[in-house]
Image: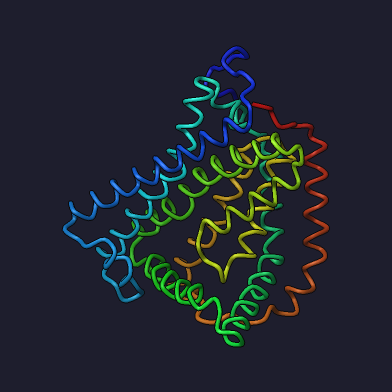
Amino acid sequence: MEFSGESEQDNPVIPPFVVLMTLLLAVMASILLASVLTLGWARWQGVELISALQTLDETSARSARDFARIVNLLNHVATFTCSALLVAVLLARRAWGRFFSMQTWPDWRSLGLGIVFILSSFPIAQITYWLNHVLVMWLYERFQILGWAVSMEKTTNSMLKGLLVMEHPAELGLNLLVVAVAPALGEELLFRGILQKQLARLMRQPVFAIWLTALIFSAIHGQFLGFLPRVVLGAALGYLFYWSGNLWLPIVAHFVTNAMQVVAQYASGGQLAQTEVNAPSIGAWLLLLPAIALLLFIGYRLRLRNLPPTVT
């Protein structure tokens, strides 16, 4: 399945430094656009933006929850999706599919492998989440540092719990759009489709580019108690892109990961909201080595399917 009707002459070899500088400028412009859109939405709704977001929690009314969801959607689409697409339009024109390495839709076997691959990273993410939490809290309690991170995490978690309250199927649909569709598309276009790909070209070290992009991907979320597991997720998505050479695989895998959490929260009636971080179960530790082995096996199989990345 071909996308965008591009040709070789539409796809000049663009120096990676030029792409990265253009991306930086596009992100800055898109952040400004996000501010204008969210402030405009708040004024139209007659709501004070900062106060509405800071006071959102599980007891908030549906109108407050939906307001925050739209704010998050506008901010995410403007910051990530628009900036990535702006770079593609400026530098690749009609060759945007080739630019992002998404000019063809992967076959269903590759998609299945990609989904199993990302799900196999869950035991690693669970253990690193616990280790991350223990380390941050130890530094905070022992040396009284990282207090700002703990305070920020409490505010963010309160807002997330409010967003994940879903009393109607329409709220489930909106949350899937905000939490699953928008991040899967926008974040993968920007982080894997541009940043990782161009860093790999610039440094000629694709594995280093995967992990550097994963670190930036995690840091940009501003949730430091979940920093390490998000690095794991970012690296898993990065390897999925590197091994397959097709951006649609990490997009689909990212969507499945986030959508599963939203649907599980809705199906449980909100009972999955985590109030404390417990040590991983024995089962999680026992699954660690098999999970790593499965990740390596699937990566090997994807590599064998010979879908090399397209250089832009």
Q: In this view, does 293 lie to the left or right of 71?
A: right
* Up-down relation of residue 188 to residue 170 (above or below): above
Q: Where is residue 303 in the image (x, y as percent from the top left)?
A: 80, 39
* Up-down relation of residue 199 to residue 261 (above or below): above
* Up-down relation of residue 169 to residue 277 (above or below): above
Residues 288 and 90: in front is 90
Q: In which quarter of the image is the C terminus?
A: top right
Please tell me which residue is depicted at 62% across the width and 28% down the height of the picture. 104
Please tell me which residue is depicted at 50% across the width and 81% down the height of the picture. 275
Residues 150 and 276: in front is 150
Q: In which quarter of the image is the N terminus?
A: top right
Q: Position of residue 113 (x, y in %)?
A: 72, 46
Residue 288 placement: quadrant? bottom right
Please tell me which residue is depicted at 64% across the width and 73% down the height of the picture. 132
Residues 84 and 250: in front is 84
Q: Position of residue 173 (x, y in %)?
A: 39, 54
Work out which residue is located at the far top of the displayed protein and give it.
9
Q: Is residue 296 left or right of residue 160?
A: right
Residues 191 and 291: in front is 191
* Up-down relation of residue 276 to residue 265 (above or below): below
Q: Position of residue 226 (x, y in %)?
A: 58, 68
Please tell me which residue is depicted at 80% across the width and 60% down the height of the picture. 292
Work out which residue is located at the far bottom of the displayed protein and give it.
142
